[in-house]
Image (tube, rainbow, N blue to C red):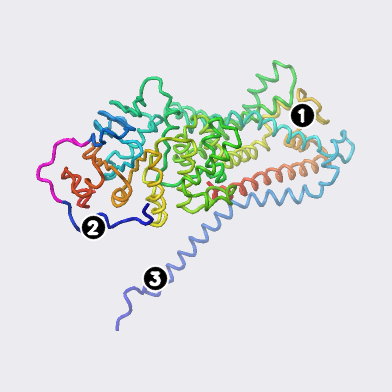
Amino acid sequence: MSTLPETARIPAGAAPVRVAAAPATASTADVPVEAEEVAFDIRNFSMWYGQRQALQEITIKISARKVTAIIGPSGCGKSTFLRSLNRMHDLTPGTRLEGTLRHFGNDLYGPGIDATAVRRRGGMVLQKSNPFPTMSIADNVLVGLRLNGMRDRSVLQERLEQSLRMAALWDEVKDLLNRPGTSLSGGQQQRLCIARSLAVQPDTLLMDEPCSALDPIATAKIEDLIQTLREKYTVVIVTHNMQQAARCSDRTAFFYMGRLIEFDNTRKIFTNPSNPQTEAYVSGRFG
Amino acid sequence: MDASPYLPSPRFARWRRWKSGAITGILVACALAVIAPLFLVIYFLLVRGYSSLDWSFFTQLPKPTGEVGGGMANAIVGTLTLLAMATVVGVPFGVFGGIYLAEYGSDRANDWIRFAADVLNGVPSIVWGMVVYLILVVPFKTFSAYAGGVALGLMMVPLVMRTTEEVLVLVPQSYREAALALGIARWKVIMVIVVRTALKGIGTGVIVALARIAGETAPLLFTALGNNFWNHNLKEPISALPLQIFAYSISPYDDWHRQAWAGALVLMALILALNITVRVLSRDRQSTL
């Protein structure tokens, strides 16, 4: 596993080869090879905030146990898309959606589906680390289990260590478990939030710009962590940082104005994109 | 060489200095006028009340008319009892109402509730007394500590509700989202994560409301009524510091006047203590929330 970010993978100055005629639609949206298990199978998924349409007919298959990066300029719908994988919009008044979103075959927005159960499957890591300020490090990790009714102390103890180890934080905090979560550094807090998500044993980790408030060293640690996590989890990461998408994802989806413009293997997106808009964005000519 | 263009003429400079000094003087005078009443109140209470404060004031019941001495022990305990009862009535309604406003209510419903709460805040306190008189005193045919506690508690509700709403809104949305994403049911997210994060602010709001109602006299006049003896049954009238001060200060006896001053000093000290608690609590809050 790499220890430091490889910024060299994309030559900074070299513009990718321009493709003469781009296909009108994102025809590569079915990228996963047949052998790969599909975690999210999303078809013609549209979403509105009141009158404003935020997502337009997104069709995409997100593979299980891969890292999928979502890139695109601000306001392109990437965060909206990420949150819809977890039904986080349910509490926003005035949202409306069309199309289907299946997770291992189950329609997440089907009638009678319990949104709380859906959210238990998909852990979320937000831009700004947000350990609960009234809780210790241990309580932060265990709050999801405890509030879902887990009382068994040995299970809690085991899950605490397991989650913190998985988030590569155990060695740094094993003697500070009763200190407030907010006493940690920014990067440690973000890993604590990852441990908190892992403790409820989700199968998906949804990360919304998890490193944008971190320094390069803390960022490198989180990116390393993502590489480990993909062995067990489906990771979807929204990022503004294209080097980050290039470094740590298997697949990259480019969103623009609420549409999925292109979805392909990350190397292809950054070296030889099919769509001129993708090419312009990844080479830094707009966005 | 010419004088610098940035240098005003000496006459103009003098005029500006004079003008600046005059305006500053007016502002300082206004600021002093604002805080002067507080110091006047404390000064007079100390001068008139301190000499009448002695141990028996805190330990003895009022003496019968004509006898010198005695104290307000029953009124001090009565005020604390009434405040405790008001908290029991006012805090649940206020806090849960505030949670509804901050977390559940639609914009339209919230506008109406806030408007109603603001109107309630402006209802004269004697009106609260009359309302509780009608619903708790007349039907049970007796003045009671319960009626006094309810009257004060009802006054607390809108105060506590609005401060609770304000501090809950301050809790960052990201905590709610992070907790929801852990698959925690929404009501647990609100009660365990959001309310707990804002607990200190809610406590501050409760104490502010207590300080507001601790000195209220009018709502107690037809509810708690007052009592020259210990209250052994909350279904019976109870004494309170403001009531005792009122009764003593309109009496014709010098000794009772002195006791009224002492009672006012004790009441003022209680309210000041509540306000200082708030200052200390809210100073901590800025560092954590």
Q: Are marks 2 and 3 on the same chain?
A: no
Distance between the alpha carbons at the discs numbered 2 and 3:
62 Å
Q: Position of residue B179 (x, y in %)?
A: 48, 36
Which residue position holds label 3? B12
**Percent position of residue B216, x then y:** 67, 35
Mark 3 closeness class: few <14, some 14–19, many ≥20 residues within 10 Å: few
Q: Secondary structure at mark 1?
A: loop
**In magenta stretch: residue B280:** no
- Which residue is identified by label 2? A12
* Amino acid identity at mark 1: Ile
Q: Quadrant of residue A65?
A: top left
Q: Chain of mark 1?
A: B
Q: Which residue has dot 1 on it?
A: B238
* Percent position of residue B280, x then y: 62, 49
Disc 2 marks a residue whose amino acid type is Ala
In the shown orientation, is residue B74 left or right of residue B201?
right
The residue positioned farthest toward the left in the image shown: A20
Q: Which residues are magenta?
A: A17-28
Vertical order, A165 against B236 (above or below): below
Secondary structure at numbered mark 2 = loop
Amino acid type of the residue tagged 3 in the rendering: Phe
- The answer to whether residue A245 is left or right of residue A91 is left
